[in-house]
């Protein structure tokens, strides 16, 4: 009990990247919560509700990857695996390099690209 409280009481912060993704979801009319503490004690960036199904979205900046590679580091892989097993949630990652590629598009294309990208991820 004590360990769970300590584990789940870490400071939660939102990145600009996470705020961008949340804004795009909001503009799409998707229902979601931010910085949700799950029963396992893990916090997730966004919990999306689509067709009565909940999906965890992790917005992953550079610190979630090994060096400059696109391979998730051990901490990130463990967190995803445990959320799937303990909380029975699908976990979707929005890696920074994919989101940044959309942000580099001209404004009109970016406004179309963000919803398309998120719709594809969410199925």
Image (tube, rainbow, N blue to C red):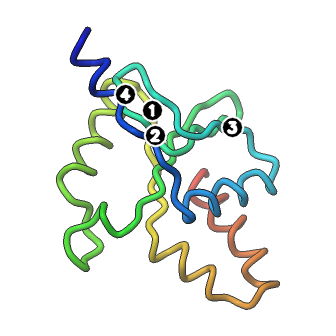
Q: Quadrant of residue 118?
A: bottom right
Give the residue drawn at x 42%, y 35%: 43
Label of residue 44 in the image: 2
Task: Report the residue marked by disc 1.
Answer: 89
Label of residue 9 in the image: 4
Q: Residue furthest top?
A: 1
Query: Are circles 2 and 1 on residues that touch, CB within 8 Å?
Result: yes
Q: Looking at the image, is mark 4 or mark 3 earlier in the sequence? A: 4
Q: CA distance from mark 2 to mark 1?
A: 11 Å
Of marks 2 and 1, the one in the foreground: 2
Is 51 situated above or below 106? above
Residue toward you, 88 or 103 = 103
Check disc 1 and report its element: helix, strand or loop. Answer: loop
Residue 22 in the image: state x and y as whole percent: 66, 53
Q: CA distance from mark 2 to mark 4?
A: 13 Å
Q: Looking at the image, is mark 4 or mark 1 earlier in the sequence? A: 4
Q: Is residue 22 left or right of residue 9?
A: right
Residue 111 in the image: state x and y as whole percent: 78, 75
Residue 52 in the image: state x and y as whole percent: 68, 27
Task: Report the residue marked by disc 3.
Answer: 50
Of marks 2 and 3, the one in the foreground: 2
Q: Is residue 71 left or right of residue 97?
A: left
């Amino acid at each position: 009990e004590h360990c769970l409280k300590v584990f789940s009481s870490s400071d939660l912060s939102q990145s600009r990247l996470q705020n961008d993704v949340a804004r795009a979801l909001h503009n799409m009319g998707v229902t979601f919560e931010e910085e949700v503490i799950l029963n396992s004690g893990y916090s997730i960036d966004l919990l999306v509700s689509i067709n009565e199904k909940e999906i965890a979205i992790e917005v992953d900046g550079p610190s979630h990857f090994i060096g400059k590679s696109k391979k998730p580091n051990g901490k990130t892989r463990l967190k995803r695996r445990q959320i799937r097993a303990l909380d029975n949630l699908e976990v979707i990652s929005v890696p920074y390099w994919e989101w940044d590629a959309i942000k580099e598009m001209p404004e009109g294309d970016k406004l179309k690209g963000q919803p398309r990208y998120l719709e594809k991820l969410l199925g």
